[in-house]
Image (cartoon, helix red, strand yellow):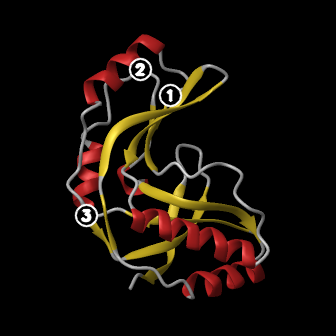
Amino acid sequence: MLRLFVALALPDQVKAQLAALSGGLPGARWVPAENYHLTLRFIGEIEAWQAEEVDAALAAIRAPRFDLALAGIGTFEKGGRIQSIHITAERSPGLTHLQAKVETALQRVGLPPERRRFAPHVTLARTDKVETHKLIGFIQAHSLFRSPPVPVENFCLFSSFLGKEAAHYTSEVEYALG
């Protein structure tokens, strides 16, 4: 079984900007800079033959290049507690179009539809063990974060291997945008 997801890889200069935000929250589990990405669609565990079908479907996608800008900090909560903090990606017609194309392609090869609404972001840390007042202070201190727009010229199929400390992601295939 392969554990896969479709995402945008981020340029090194953006990763460096995001990594500079890491720290100052006791109990937070920070995502390593090499793992920063913007998920277009999580696939999960599938058989190798299904991965070949996924690859063919993604390779057939035709979508234009676009610019990606990251701005602001956000959170995801579960049961009233903040589980993670992330940097939000600004929605753009290009990003929305590409994500919709990916979703359609994956459904055509038999994967179930994504149940969650697309919320483009880059996860910075898991925060389920961080005191709420410290989280609020961190969010307020970094709420004006903004990266300059970067050109997006491709998207990738990543494999994910879960480790004890952090997951390890490998870009398996890059798909060029028109």
The residue closer to the viewer here, 101 or 20, is: 101
Q: Which mark identifies residue 150? A: 3
x and y percent of residue 140 in the render?
30, 22
User: Which quadrant is home to the C terminus?
Assistant: bottom left
Name the residue: 59% across, 50% down.
163
* Residue 120 visible, this angle: yes
Q: CA distance from mark 1 to mark 3?
A: 28 Å
Name the side, left or right, on which 136 lies relative to 146: right
User: Does 62 sit above or below residue 111?
Assistant: below
Q: 10 Å neighbourhood of mark 2: few (<14), some, or many (≥20)?
A: many
Please name the amino acid that badge 1 sits on: Thr
User: Which quadrant is home to the N terminus?
Assistant: bottom right
Closer to the eye: label 1 or 3? 3
Q: CA distance from mark 2 to mark 1?
A: 8 Å
**Residue 91's image quarter?**
bottom left
x and y percent of residue 10 in the render?
34, 62
Name the residue: 57% across, 73% down.
101
Please name the amino acid that badge 2 sits on: Leu
User: Does 104 sit above or below residue 77?
Assistant: below
Closer to the eye: label 3 or 2? 3
Q: Tag 1, which secondary structure?
A: loop
x and y percent of residue 7 in the render?
49, 64
Q: Tag 2, which secondary structure?
A: helix
Q: Which residue is mark 2?
A: 135
Q: Which mark identifies residue 127? A: 1
Are the residues tagged 2 and 1 within 8 Å (C-beta)? yes
The residue closer to the viewer here, 157 or 68, is: 68
Please name the amino acid that badge 3 sits on: Val
Q: CA distance from mark 3 to mark 2?
A: 28 Å
The residue closer to the viewer here, 77 or 49, is: 77
